[in-house]
Structure formats: C-alpha cells, structure tokens
C-alpha cells in the first residue's frame, strides 16, 4: 500500500530538502560529502561540500576534518563528484544564481583540493547563464590575486570568498579555538581579496568560549562583526556575515572544555536573531548558521535553551531566505585602514 500523499511529500522533504543529513562521510571518492539546492538570501544557490583530503588544520572547535579522507583524492574523483551533483540537480540548472564550492577546509589549498579540478569546475560554470556568483571557501592565507583573477576571467562570474573569521579576540582565536591565523595574516588576506575584486563572506561565532555569559557573547559577536565591516569597507570589499551559534562538536578539544564548565549553556537563538536584525538595520548583510552539520547532539546546541521554539526557528529560516540586505550596501561610515598600523580612520563623506 502506498503512503498517503502528505507523508510521501514529507519524507521527500526530509531526505532531499534543507533537513537532509549532512554530517556523514561520502560513500566513495567519486561522491561529495553533501550538496543542497537552497534559497540563500533571496538567491538560488547550489552548495557543494566536496570530498577531498582533509583540512591540514585541526582547529579545537571543528570536527569536520574527522569525516574527510586522510588520502589524496585525485582530480578525476573530484570532477566525478561535480558531475554527480549536476546530474542530481539537472532540472534546476536553469534557475541557479550562485554556486558554493567547499571541501570543509580550503579549496585553494592545493595539498587537499586538486588545482586543475578547481580550474575546470569554475570554468564550466560559465555555461550556466543565470549564475552570477561563485562562492569559494578557504582560509585567506592560500589566496593569490593572480589565481583569483584567472578563475574570474575563465568563469565570467563574480567571486565571493567564504572564510572562517570566528572572532577578533586574539586570545580566543588561539587559546580557545586554535585558529593558528593571527589577525595580521587575515588582514593581509583581505588585501588580496580587495586586489582581485572579490566579495567576502565571513563566519562569526556567537559564544566562542563556553565560559561566556549570554551578554558577553552578544558583545563579542557584535564587536567582531563591526571589525570585519570596518576593514572590508576600508578596502571596498562587499561583506556578508554568517553568524554561527556555537555548538559542542563531538570529539573536539572545545567539547572537552565545555564539559568542564559547570552548567554550560549554548547560545540562545533569540539573541542570535536579534543581533542579526540589529546589524541588518545598520546595512550589514547577515544570515544565520542554523545547522550543527550533524556533528552535535541537540542538547548541546541552541535547541536546548529555554527560548527555543519551532516558531523562532522558522523566523530564522525566513531571514536566511529573504534577501532584504545586500552585501554591497553600507550604511556605516567607510574607513581607510592605515597600511603601516592597520588602524582605522573614518573617512569624511
């Protein structure tokens, strides 16, 4: 006996829509870890998490490398993954407006992602006329302006660099998160992004230290967002913030730290939504990281807090799809970064 229509549709949505599982490893080297056709800030986006050799960095809060390959996956395997995704999404290719390319690390790290595969994939996207932007996830230290310009020219698309900034607090970056990316290195990477005419999307963590109060988490996330906005505005870089509520990723050093905090509480979703709305009111494009990527238990995420409701979650989902704030629209004063000191000076308009 066939399922009732509503159960059938609900099952398809859970399997293939936004709720689909994303924490599992790819079953073979010719399959990606995950892909999803989604509505992202008002645009049709195809997001692909390629299956490549794992990230060389082992940040204390990140469990993503655990599921990635220890071995090199050659160009032929990576290209096969892209072909597989295109076949699966073939009926929607005509409506795509952006494509996001990631490998849960850095796609410009040529020790993990084959350079020629990236060249072929991005060049092929030229055949999709409605796609205006390619989003490429990487640490900024791997960027070279000439490489970015080559990809932009061959693809004919605007490039958006997706990167984890996390926090401006130097102590949190190294002692708590283990980023191994000094702010000076990040800012030099921003110079490359600007030189190549790219946009930037940056992750900011909400409550990056488990000992933080809710009030401290808000203040720190707002300060980090402002820091990014000011430095990007100084360089003329359109910026989008992904505000990520911290979750306890199983098996990480950060999880061990959280376990030692008496009565640890993850962030509140209501705080994250309110901060995003506040920064949007200032003209900063913000969306919310609403998934724990299959790497945490629900009682170690924002879902465990007293404010959580399905209605509140739906509000966040709607925010992520509304497209009301453009990354090219700045209401805060533009600034100039001093080349010698990286200090910020307001520019008279």
Image: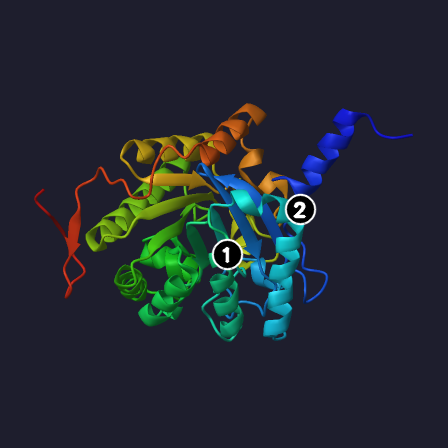
Residue 10 visible? The answer is yes
Residue underneath mark 1: 127
- Which residue is painted at 41% across and 36% down in the image? 214
Q: Residues within 10 Å of mark 1 (few under 14, many from 20)?
A: few
Residue 8 image-quadrant placement: top right
Question: Within 10 Å of the Cα at label 2, are there few (<14), some (14-19), or many (20+) other Cα atoms?
Answer: few
Residue at the spot x=32%, y=45% of the render? 225
Q: Earlier in the sequence, mark 2 or mark 1?
A: 2
- Nearer the observer: mark 2 or 1; the answer is 1
Find residue 21 and name its label.
2
Q: Position of residue 66 (x, y in %)?
A: 61, 63
Quadrant location of the C terminus in the rendered image: top left
Q: Is residue 293 above or below residue 120?
A: above
Which SS class for mark 1? Answer: helix
Instruction: Tell me if residue 265 can be seen.
Output: no
Q: Is residue 325 above or below residue 69?
A: above
**As rendered, which of 100 and 22 lies closer to the eye?**
100
Q: Nearer the viewer, residue 326 or 263?
A: 326
**Residue 298 place in picture, x, y as percent:** 62, 40
Quarter placement of the N terminus? top right
In the image, residue 105 sits, relative to residue 112, either above or below, namely: above
């Amino acid at each position: 006996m066939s399922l009732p229509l509503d159960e059938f549709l609900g099952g398809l949505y859970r399997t293939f829509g936004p709720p689909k599982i994303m924490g599992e490893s790819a079953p073979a080297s010719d399959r990606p870890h995950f892909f999803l056709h989604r509505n992202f800030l008002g645009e049709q986006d195809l997001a692909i998490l390629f299956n490549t050799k794992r990230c060389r960095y082992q940040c204390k809060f990140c469990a993503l490398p655990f599921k990635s390959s220890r071995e090199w996956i050659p160009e032929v395997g990576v290209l096969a993954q892209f072909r597989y995704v295109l076949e699966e999404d073939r009926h929607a290719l005509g409506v795509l407006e952006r494509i996001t390319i990631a490998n849960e690390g850095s796609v410009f790290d040529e020790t993990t992602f084959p350079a020629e595969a990236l060249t072929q994939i991005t060049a092929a996207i030229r055949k999709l006329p409605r796609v205006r932007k390619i989003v490429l996830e990487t640490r900024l230290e791997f960027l070279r302006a000439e490489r970015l310009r080559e990809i932009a020219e061959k693809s004919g698309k605007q490039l958006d660099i997706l990167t984890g900034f996390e926090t401006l607090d130097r102590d949190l970056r190294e002692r708590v998160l283990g980023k191994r990316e000094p702010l000076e290195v990040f800012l030099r990477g921003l110079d490359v992004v600007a030189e190549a005419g790219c946009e930037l999307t940056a992750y900011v963590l909400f409550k990056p230290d488990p000992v933080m109060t809710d009030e401290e988490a808000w203040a720190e996330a707002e300060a980090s967002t402002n820091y990014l906005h000011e430095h990007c505005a100084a360089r003329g870089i359109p910026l989008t913030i992904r505000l990520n509520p911290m979750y306890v990723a199983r098996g990480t050093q950060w999880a061990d730290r959280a376990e030692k905090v008496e009565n640890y509480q993850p962030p509140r979703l209501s705080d994250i939504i309110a901060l995003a709305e506040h920064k949007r009111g200032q003209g900063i494009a913000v969306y919310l990281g609403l998934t724990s990527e299959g790497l945490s238990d629900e009682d170690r995420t924002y879902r465990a807090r007293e404010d959580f409701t399905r209605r509140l979650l739906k509000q966040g989902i709607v925010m992520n799809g509304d497209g009301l704030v453009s990354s090219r629209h700045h209401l805060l004063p533009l600034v100039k970064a001093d080349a010698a000191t990286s200090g910020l000076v307001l520019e008279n308009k």
